[in-house]
Amino acid sequence: MRPHAIRLCLGFPVLALLLMAPPAGAIDAPALPPATAGAMAQAVSPQAIAEYRRKLREYQEARAAFEQEAGAYWSSIYEKRKGRNAKRRGRQAIALDDYVLTQPPRYTGPKRPVNPEGEPEVPPRERKPIPVVADFLKAAAEHFQFAPQRPASEAEFKRVYARTALASGLTREQAVRVYSFETGGNGHHDMQSGLSASRPGSRAISTAIGYNQLLTTNSVELLAEQGHEFIKALTEKAARLSGPARKAIDHKIAVLKRMVAFSRTVPDEWAAHEKLANTPQGWAVHAMVLDIDVGPLLQTHKLLTSVLFARAKGHTKPLTAAELEMMNLTGDGTGLDMVTMPQAMREQVPTSNFFQRGGYERNPVAIRHNTVAKLLAITDERMDSNSGKPGAKQLAASF
């Protein structure tokens, strides 16, 4: 089951690195090296220390007042969300007053003053390394004795993806525009979020890979929930083959069955799938995104599950590409909350209604485009801009 809280906005690759920045107004003064701090402490006058302490009290009082205001605001966001969920379970209509209609408070008080005596040195926080494609391939070889069948060219992967998308019921517009948004219009099937050949020294910022930027957790969850369909598709293809090609796909089917069984060893919940995805075996499952047969199925079904979820909830109107992307980014439940909202409400409802506080404060896109209407509009604008790039044109031609 997909999460119902908004995830990091990976569809904005240029801005994604900004998501790791601390919220405005919460940056403390950097610690000084011990030698510098010691030298400063000897030269600091009592008056300077007294002035620093006065400013520190002002800062702490201002921050405390802000935190009280912000805490009340985000509590109201939570309560409104809980109320909407209850209404939906009771099949009641959602109204404008079921949302918080004011924007989140922003800290405008004084900055934390610099301690003239220096601050104690704080060791840097250890950053957990993010696995990359090489790690996924190594894990697949070690744990499943398998190497994904890579496409002969990017055009080949796009052709298979286009056929798979159409067969599943997705439209060309949905597939191409979501690809344009998620990859910037030029992404390859093995593109990983944060990494770029044009930016030497760039680092992965998540495990998201491919045309629709699947996370490791997405791959595990899709195999757990849709694995039987993938096995059926490969079995049908195998029936048309013979010789070495048949032997290769039979091995792939056997591996896929083992991966599906592994993915089903935990409850069908996002948190459980996430824990499984963060193991070497979970990395191995994610390597299937790169396979010419299974990769397009995984990429397509990530979008298709949102389409089917909307239909199951009674939303029969076709989803625009921007609406589908909202569900892709935020999770089906949260995304449908926005998608089913009338335009007049979209103009008034702040994006904060669909975030946890920490996620909102780390997301400059949602802060800048701070209503549902504005967020959908900027999504459409990015899709328009990126659809003219070579990768997007090649994908469109594949249909």
Image (cartoon, rainbow, N blue to C red):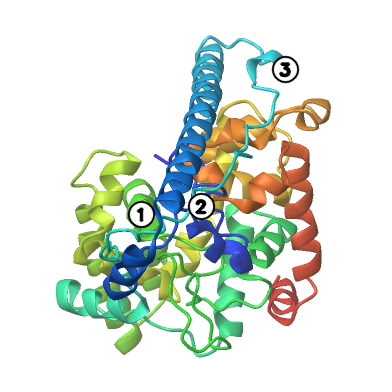
On the image, numbered disc 2 is attached to which residue? 8
Give the amino acid at mark 3.
Leu
Which residue is most to the front? 46
* Residue sitting nearer the eye, 322 or 362: 362
Q: CA distance from mark 3 to mark 2?
A: 26 Å
**CA neighbours of label 1 inside 10 A, class few (<14), some (14 to 19), many (20+):** many
Q: Who comes first in sequence, dot 3 or dot 2?
A: 2
Locate residue 381 relative to residue 92 in the image: left or right: right
Quadrant for the C terminus, please: bottom right
Q: How many marks?
A: 3
User: Which residue is the site of mark 1?
Assistant: 217
Depth check, mark 3 against mark 1: the one in front is 3
Residue under pointer 3:
96
Mark 3 in CB contact with mark 2 (< 8 angstroms): no
Work out whether 138 lies above or below 269. below
Amino acid type, label 1: Thr
Which is nearer the eye, 261 or 384? 384
Residue 350 spot, x, y in % from top left: 69, 32
Of marks 1 and 2, which one's residue comes earlier in the chain? 2
Q: Secondary structure at mark 2?
A: loop
Dividing the picture into quarters, in which one does residue 76 lie? top right
Rendered-image quadrant of the N terminus: top left
x and y, in percent, of residue 352 in the image = 61, 34
The answer to whether the residues at label 1 and label 2 have Cβ atoms under 8 Å apart is no
